[in-house]
Image (cartoon, helix red, strand yellow):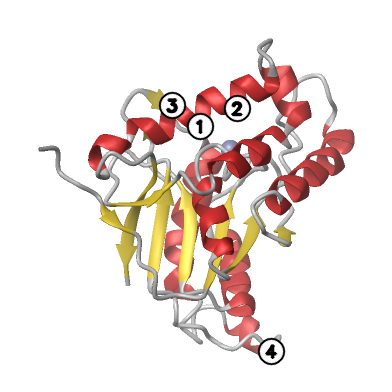
Amino acid sequence: MTQQLEPMPTDWRRALAVVAHPDDLEYGCAAAVAGWTDEGREVTYLLASRGEAGIDTIAPEECAPLREREQRASAAAVGVAAVEFLDHRDGVIEYGTALRRDIAAAIRRHRPELLITLNHRDTWGGVAWNTPDHRAVGRATLDAAGDAGNRWIFPELGEQGLEPWDGVRWVAVAGTDRPTHAVDATPGFERSVRSLLAHRTYIEVLTDEDPEAYCRTFLAGTTEAAAERFGGRPAVTFEVFAR
Ligand SMILES: [Zn+2]
């Protein structure tokens, strides 16, 4: 029998999901989020950019507010009301102390037990090269879990009234080729399709397929691929780093 994935921890109340772009959470993670908000857990989204460089035919100044609107709608589809943007520049997000500090500040504001982020490695499964933004934000999020709890790393945050929060117990990386944990995707699946579909402008440029069929096929494909490692149930997978 294939090595089975562990169920995700459930003894937490607040999660903060930190990604580079609008749509990063919807390509795979949103079904898990829908299940969590159903259970009364609080999930907040933090986006490093507004994805303003994501659509070739729409200039950044027009694209940013459009993608922000679509991201808020897609969060609402899975029960997430709080969506924040850090305004790093899409495409050239730099890994470094500025990004770590911004994420640490958000962790201190929201005090999550669970942090979610997207694949921080060089490639997607050794096959496709990852983008610099995903690598930067994924790595900075893994690092900021510790930064948020140390009052001396970014003392200026304390001066702004943001007290250290050392309560992050896990960082869960979505889109990983080394998953350790999973969440049953079935209860949240339909809403995850709605959630991805809310990025309609982006998807209509991306594919000639019917947008809803595209979203459904993509999400069914990834969640069903994980089923053999999760007792036959379609699943959203994560690589969990415990702290
Ligand atoms: Zn992205």
Label 1 with label 2: CB-CB less than 8 Å: yes
Question: Where is mark 2, residue-wise?
Answer: 215
Who comes first in sequence, dot 4 or dot 2? 4
Question: Where is mark 4, residue-wise?
Answer: 161
Question: Where is mark 1, residue-wise?
Answer: 219
Label 1 with label 3: CB-CB less than 8 Å: yes
Q: Tell me if 3 is positioned left or right of 171 in this view.
A: left
Q: In which quarter of the image is the N terminus?
A: top left
Give the spatial CA distance, label 4 vs label 2: 42 Å
Q: Confirm or reject: label 3 Cβ below 8 Å from ligand 1.
A: no
Nearest to viewer (mark 1 / mark 4): 1
- Residue 159 vs 33, above or below: the answer is below
> Circle 4 sits in a helix, a strand or a loop, which is it?
loop
Residue 33's x, y, as percent? 54, 55
Residue 47's x, y, as percent? 66, 53
Q: Residues within 10 Å of mark 4 (few under 14, many from 20)?
A: few
Give the quarter the ligand 1 occupies: top right
Nearest to viewer (mark 4 / mark 2): 2
Q: Which of 181 and 158 is in front in this view?
A: 181
Give the spatial CA distance, label 1 vs label 4: 41 Å
Going 26% across and 51% down the picture, which residue do you hit? 180
Q: How crowded is mark 3: few (under 14 residues within 10 Å), some or many (20 or more)?
A: few
Q: Tell me if 5 is positioned left or right of 49 in this view.
A: left
- For the question of whether residue 176 can be seen, the reply is yes
Residue 205's x, y, as percent? 73, 18
Going 77% across and 47% down the picture, which residue do you hit? 73
Amino acid beneath label 2: Cys
